[in-house]
Amino acid sequence: MNYCIDPLRYHRRTTREVKVGNVGIGGDNPIRVQSMITCDTMDTETSIQQTIELADAGCEIVRITAPTVKDARNLEHIVKGLRERGCNVPIVADIHFKPEAAMEAAKWVDKVRINPGNYADSKKFVIREYTDEQYAAELARIRERFSPLVELCKKRGIAVRIGTNHGSLSDRILNRYGDTPLGMVESALEFVRIARDLNYHDLVFSMKASNPKVMIAAYRLLVARLNEIGAEDARNGRGGSPEPPGRLRSIAPTWNYPLHLGVTEAGEGEDARIKSAIGIGSLLADGIGDTIRVSLTEDSPHEIPVAKALIENIKKTSNAEHRTPNIELSFDPFSYQRRATETIERAGIKLGGAELIRVVVRQANFDKIAHKIDKMGDYKPEIVYQSANVVEIDPRDDSAIAKINAERSAQFVTVRDDVDLTVIAAFRLLAAQLHARHPILLKDIFKKWEGPQRPDGRGTEAAPTFLDTLLTASTNIGSLVCDGIGDAILVQGEEAPGQALRLSYNILQAAGSRIFKTDYVACPSCGRTLFNLQTTTAKIKAATSHLKGVKIAIMGCIVNGPGEMADADFGYVGGAPGKVNLYVGKTAVKFNIPEVEAVDRLKDLIREHGKWVEATERTSALETVS
């Protein structure tokens, strides 16, 4: 199965155009930026104001939650108020659990987002075997519940997003496919088949997860399955709506639906931006994605500059012209497995094999922080580049590759800084050509910015900001690590040694490759949220940020509750106004705790399960490397 045209050269995936109000998604349209307002949907004036603020910030499509029929009905007043004030940004209704709310919302909005895991299902996490007859009966029930919405959207000419979330799958899907990327894809396909049977094609897909590896695999698998089904339809003479004009001809003209990208519950701050860049940036680099949303536990307008910067980064790399051979990938794009190498040692540090992915620095940066390395704890540099006997090559140089592969001992290999390849393409090519036993050192960039001249020699551009550096490093290194490539990393796009080190370790943490600190999964706020997510997240972080390796989910409501917490150790979930439920994994263990007590009760719960340690007095390692 193929998930992109060429893993070494940028080709944007060809899709049909789907109109959302006055905005086109897919086709020849640019990649669109979306976000979501955070207030109560019944607060009409604030909903209008937040939507206008997002539109003014550059948001092209705005989503509003509609948890009840009453909320959905109020969308009429919100949309009317926006249009009266001259704001024509398309509005999307976000629906969970209640088909009745979807039917009401579809009367007023430009698109309806449903989650196939809970649109007509209630998750009980029940383990049972479904016979083929029982499974078919469940699908018939789903068809009965979903078809009226399809018919209404078709009549009104509005779109539907089938938005699957990892950990938020129906019991039916979980029991047949597991909580897997395959389960996510099959969950969405069940719904699209119903829509297609009704000759409705204004569909957009999403496959969100808080784990970038899962999210990347799910989108790749979805694209591969759409291509596969479309090709099968073509062979069997089954038609569909006509292929759109424009870019490269698709092999699957009737199944080429646009994709909306996002890493859900990414959290806040630098960590959230890194995690989003790994997931969204790596897919955009492969030409996948027609609209994106960066989910931050912050005020929604903060999401827009990050999303725009990710798109701009891809525009730069997509213009690269370079020669690459045809290769067979060294990794399975649909499931993670780290590339198998031999273990080697550099200056007393082991790397490769089953060892941790190591952090490398240049000698000049090492010298700048040498006086405080003993205070850095787990966040210090591990290998100095100039002392590591790193072999630098152009991965297109067959003679250089053959020479390394002929060596009796494993070599530490990287790509030369002067190659005219994009970073992801260069290291994928290197991994494919090099014998697997040789460990690879990844880099975030090949050519440093050195003034007004662009690195590619064409014109001038401004010096990159730290956000640019962060997103570039996260996209390039994070994508490759999620491909299973890389035994050490070198961030050289950031000059400040402390920031470069922090960025290195945070990328490895976000990719799930090395755990140095508490990991937080926090949903963005919305109208369903039952407490202030930003202040609550800050309180929980203040109390627990010293717990290395513990994963805590902070969810504003049950929609983003036990299912979407996925692999978190502990969960803090809004249960009712002013009340919190605490979870261990996906199991609720403490209910209706007053919000003022909930953080302390969370600490008690962590103690009960043997994962609590007291904070030490020494300076935190992250502060040391800042």
Image (cartoon, rainbow, N blue to C red):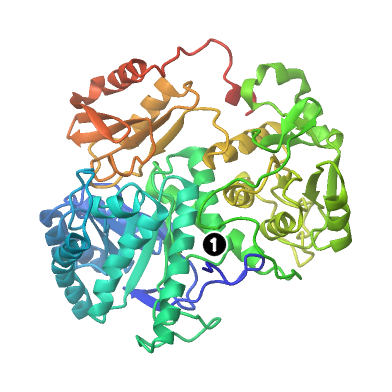
In the image, taking residue 49 as reference, residue 146 lies left or right, namely left
In the image, taking residue 278 as reference, residue 38 lies left or right, namely left
Q: Quadrant of residue 398 in the image?
A: bottom right
Query: Where is residue 535 shown, x and y percent of the image?
Result: 34, 31
Dot 1: few (<14), some (14–19), or many (≥20) neighbours within 10 Å? many
In the image, taking residue 512 as reference, residue 319 lies left or right, namely right
Q: Nearer the viewer, residue 100 or 352?
A: 352
Q: Quadrant of residue 207 in the image?
A: bottom left
Query: Where is residue 265 shown, x and y percent of the image?
Result: 39, 44
Question: Which amino acid, mark 1?
Answer: Leu
Q: Visible in this render: residue 261?
A: yes
Q: Which of 538 and 17 is in front in this view?
A: 17
Q: Nearer the viewer, residue 1 or 247?
A: 1
Query: Where is residue 124 shown, x and y percent of the image?
Result: 19, 44
What residue is pinned by disc 1? 284
The residue sitting at 38% across, 39% down in the picture is 522
Report the quarter where the C terminus lies. Answer: top right
Compared to 428, does 25 lie above or below? Answer: below
Q: Visible in this render: residue 309?
A: no
The residue sitting at 42% across, 40% down in the picture is 267
Q: Which of 439 and 359 is in front in this view?
A: 439
Query: Where is residue 333 shown, x and y percent of the image?
Result: 55, 58
The residue sitting at 22% across, 79% down in the picture is 198
Compared to 594, does 165 lie above or below? Answer: below
The residue sitting at 64% across, 61% down in the picture is 329
